[in-house]
Amino acid sequence: MTLAIDPATAVFAIDHSRCIGCRACVQACAECDTHRGVSLIHLDTVDRMASTQTIPMVCMHCEDPTCAEVCPADAIKQNEDGVVQSSLKPRCIGCSNCVYACPFGIPKYISSFDQMMKCDMCYDRTSDGLKPMCASVCPSEALWYGSTEQFESERTGALVREWSFGRQEVRTKVAIVAVEAGPVDVFIGRRPIPWLEDPFGLEESA
Amino acid sequence: MSGLPVSEEALIERYGPHLNRTPPGGWDAEVETDRVVDTHCCFCGQQCGIRLKVRDDRVVGFEPRYDFPFNEGKLCPKGVKRYLQGSHPDRLLQPLERDPSAPTGFRAVTWDHALDRTANEIRRIQGEYGADSFAVLSGVSISNEKSYLMGKFARLGIGTANLDYNGRLCMVSAGAAGKKALGIDRAANPWSDIPLAEVVFVAGANIAECAPITTSYIWKARDRGAKLIVMDPRVTPAARTADVFLGVRPGTDLAVLEAMLHILIERDWLDHRFIADHTNGFDEAAEAVKGATPAWAAEISGVPAARIEQAAELWGTATTGMLLHARGIEHHTKGVDNVLACINLGLATGKYGKPGCGVNTITGQGNGQGGREHGHKCDQLPGNRDIDNPEHREHVASVWGCDASEIPGKGLTAQEIMDAIHSGEIKGLLSICFNPLVSLPDANFTREALDRLEHYAVIDFFLSETAAHADVVLPGSLHEEDEGTVTTLEGRVVKVNQAIPPPGEARRDWEIICDLAARLGQGRYFEYTSTEEIFDELRRASRGGTADYSGITWKRVVEEQGVFWPCPEEGHPGTPRLYEGGRFYHPDGRARFIPTPWRESSETPDEEYPIYLTTGRVISQYLSGTQTRRIGALVDQYPEPLCEIHPRLADQLGVEDGDLVLLTSRRGSMTAPAKVVSSIRPDTVFVPYHWPGEKSINLLTKRALDPISKIPEFKVSAVRVEKVEGHGDVFDDRDLTLHGERS
């Protein structure tokens, strides 16, 4: 069946608070017909000793992609829906400029292919009105893909698409979900959960 | 028979587990497929819809099944990689017979030989030691049709009372409590009720790893403003953002639940009208929790009293609420009482039979719901009937075309069957879809028992660690190699479709059973020509029982994307939500409050064994791992059991991340790398149970059973933890390479 989601206006949202670290996204990414056996999504464990928090990251699909700007071979293209694609095989020289330049750390140089590959938002699927593989399978909907109207009617949180890395301003097609609208300081983070400081009440009198 | 036929290494070399990493033909193979089959995942009780891609009669990949309403395309990593269990080098393709002189321990034999020998041994053992000396152990990863058939086969084909199933290790505490309090054993709600709840209380359920799709339903509720309470000895991934976290000591959930009822009564957060109109026994239950103050419960459970009060307030003041529980409160010698205490919280606040209201078990096994209804439990006949009830026996006998006196009475439960094998009362065993050497407690005891059997026959698709002890191995069918129905954790009957034929000489399980019945001279009861015929007989057998399927047809199941039982006639719409209008399933229509006085676990820490051990699952493995330990991408995610240990305890023991620790209980010991995490209580260690041999945490667990449900107490043991020489491989996910293999 087709879900008839218009890729030009679709929302791809990542809500890290919902990630359960299950790696369904990693496993499903490798099942995509265009890069079978190779997973291009990132899933990082932040600090397992401190928390079960895990962070899935797909390509953020910048409006002005840094990876493409720094590519000496003009091998990274953005299509009409704003999706930034993997390097074009005939052009990529494997220099890894993009790998170093991407503010989100997304592109990977893959030696067995001798080219840079990255998430292309499953363009073979999304151009057909389907969801990308990772957002199709994500059990907790930490990775979510659908229309703006659907997001607004069903989900809470504000979509963050504007980023500051030092003096570099970046605007992305993919959004990160924040608790509320407005600037987010990554060093302070989200609304605190009181019990999380002491889950087992070791400091409280039982 | 004694011991394995050849060395463990020789068995593993031939029969695995080997790791299958690539689809048939490799990753570069043509992606065109011959057909795409709509079916379900073969693993947990959620039974997610999935589409399997087939080429040349081999499953080569999957597609999300967006149109199936439960999961709308979602899958966990096991679902994504499930297709790699087919075309597997370890797949059993021929009947085998134990042969210690063969290099691999087994020789291939003909079906005739394998079935003749099994039938002869069944009759010889029964002739020599009595009808019940031959036992059957079944499993609930198999369909409703096969579950039904195994019950009928044990009773009429073999004629033994001793038939039970591995659901005994899973949902039986919830089932027994549901029958006692509510008159029926089924989840109260379709999962679509979860988003309608103002409060969701997850009690002893690691939903992120054991029922991952359920996480999305809880977030839907939270998006609508619901509060989340989680009770667990570990801060599980889904607990991380909870509004209230109750970090209980293992085995003390009951104290917290009783204190919550105490608070509800004291603060008058009760639905008096519901209690008066729809329940019995409130006063006795109230009396029983009079002394269960939050301070008392805090002392026992280690949960601060203020948090128990917060939880009670959230539950008591919300108009709607869903309580979801699983093995965390059920795997106890008071598993039934724990569930009854949850039910009491639901009844006291009137949270039943309305949208967004209910107390539900999250059934674990693939067909954990349907498989516990149709008669391969030792005390049960189809339709969740009682094998001791003369009317129930008459009805089933009339469907089976036998005399009621031919149906044996109640037999032993799964662990009790293993105990009776160990003590020599049971001499022969046929098992299907059950790997007790990994999944039962006290694995050394199980191994001893298996070696005392005079004859052991196994139906399976891989040679599990238990099957390696068999005399005869009959290659059966994988989930995708037969069709049939399963009933999901919601009580929704869904259709599994055949994607490919069984490979080699492997056969569909039900055909093997029917052939065996014929050789036992009982073929007249087993003359089926299709799987659907078995279902149609199951429908008739279930008619009038509490689990009434008589109105459910395969056609309806497909057209309606599943039908919820009870469904007593063909025009009946099915029953997604139970107890509407406050009608319960006891003859008087009323639910029962049942008092659950506090008691300790069978074993608690002492000077010699000062630490709690609790066990459970990880996301990438399923149960005893017979299937998932053969799939490379899943094994890479979590290759071997790790011992989760709090930094405070680790400091005391001088243990750092990755150091090997020796865990010892009164039953046995094992060594595992320490994974130092602050997400577990400092007085508790956790080890997952999916592995065999030296890596089996069930070497340490205790054969202590709930007196009613007979579920073993997997969740509480007392152990000693010591640092030993060596360092293990505690990697984290960042070490996985792009190809999914570890660097």
Image (tube, helix red, strand yellow):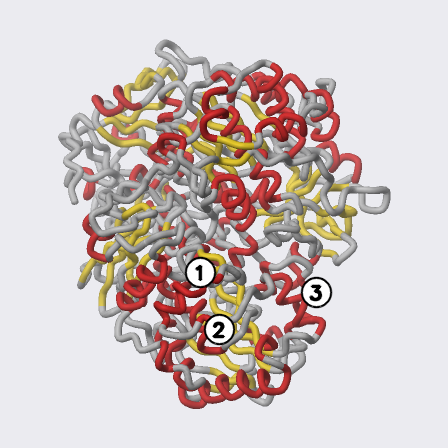
Residue B666 image point, x, y percent:
78, 55
Q: Earlier in the sequence, mark 3 or mark 1?
A: 1
Give the residue at the far top of this rendering. A182
Label at residue B405: 2
Q: Secondary structure at mark 3?
A: helix
Q: Secondary structure at mark 1?
A: helix
Q: Earlier in the sequence, mark 2 or mark 3?
A: 2
Residue B172 image point, x, y percent:
54, 50
**Tags 2 and 3 touching, CB below 8 Å:** no
Instruction: Identify the residue position indicated by label 1 in the image.
Output: B391
**Chain of residue at mark 1:** B
Q: Nearer the viewer, mark 2 or mark 3?
A: 2
Instruction: Identify the residue position indicated by label 3 in the image.
Output: B444
Alpha carbon distance from label 2 to label 3: 38 Å
Residue B607 image point, x, y percent:
86, 42
Given the image, on which type of amino acid does mark 2 rest? Ser
Seen in the picture, residue A82 relative to B372 is either above or below; the reply is above
Circle 1 crowding by C-alpha within 10 Å: few under 14, some 14–19, many from 20: few
Seen in the picture, residue B533 relative to A183 is either above or below; the reply is below
Alpha carbon distance from label 2 to label 1: 12 Å
Seen in the picture, residue B647 relative to B311 is either above or below; the reply is below
**Chain of residue at mark 3:** B
